[in-house]
Amino acid sequence: MPEPLNLVFDLDGTLIDSAPQIHAAANIVFGNMGLPPFSHATVRGFIGNGVGVLVRRLMAHQDLDESPELVDELVGRFVSIYEEAFDLTTLYPGVSSALSDLESAGCRLAICTNRPERPTRAVLRHFKLEALFPVVVGGDTLPQRKPHPEPLLAALRHMGPGKALFIGDSEVDAETAREARVPLALYTGGYRKAAAETLGAKVVFDDHAALPQLIRHIAPRL
């Protein structure tokens, strides 16, 4: 690649499958309130807009009053679990080698996620990926979070000049890329609900092992 390429990755649903962990956390947090458990499908369908939105959606599902005090309390409980529990979270196949290959090829890597920053850094440390991502923008790093374009644009400013690509898995990521005017690479194995062809991605992939070659192929046209 003749010039530095800035690759910004979403986290949940793109690099890691955290839905089982989030499902377990939801049932712990709400189960401690004496409420019935959520199905995995219900929780998975609520993922994508950050822990605050997730909590409010789960509260609405349980017909709870969404008072700011209770939302803050439940968000705090979720975040504490995120920082400590990784037993149900997995890397998607091929992620580690793909990231190492891209870094070795001279790409700059960053994370832009709606997961809070401290739990994001914790899960990157757990999977020994932290050194690959000198730039991390979490859901609470800035006043804005995705799909607002500012988190993605802030990550790119920290990375320095160069062509850019945002790699994500969802409608939220597609809107973020569109609003930031950054091309999108869409991973189809994540938490997307809409048809992949409707999200305006520059490239669509279902195998992380193929990502370095795909990026090499499209880099001249970014």
Image (cartoon, rainbow, N blue to C red):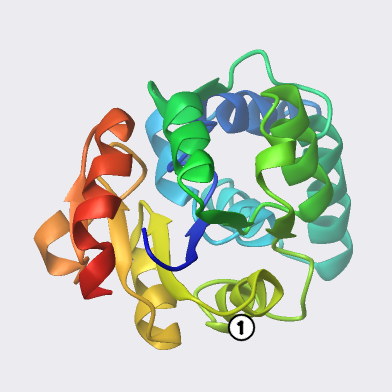
**In this view of the protein, can residue 64 be seen by the observer?**
no
The quadrant the N terminus occupies is bottom left
Q: Residue at x 51, y 39 (%)?
A: 104
Q: Residue at x 36, y 44 (%)?
A: 191
Please name the residue that numbered disc 1 is placed on.
Answer: 150
Q: Tell me which amino acid carries mark 1.
A: Glu
* Residue 151, image x, y percentages: 63, 75
Q: Residue at x 69, y 20 (%)?
A: 86
185 to 23, vertically: above or below: below
The quadrant the C terminus occupies is bottom left
* Residue 127, image x, y percentages: 67, 24
Q: Residue at x 80, y 35 (%)?
A: 122
Judge by depth and name the residue closer to the eye, 87 or 111. 111
Judge by depth and name the residue closer to the eye, 170 or 38. 170
Q: Quadrant of residue 113?
A: bottom right
* Residue 76, image x, y percentages: 87, 48
130 to 221, vertically: above or below: above
Judge by depth and name the residue closer to the eye, 56 or 6. 6
Residue at the left extreme? Answer: 197
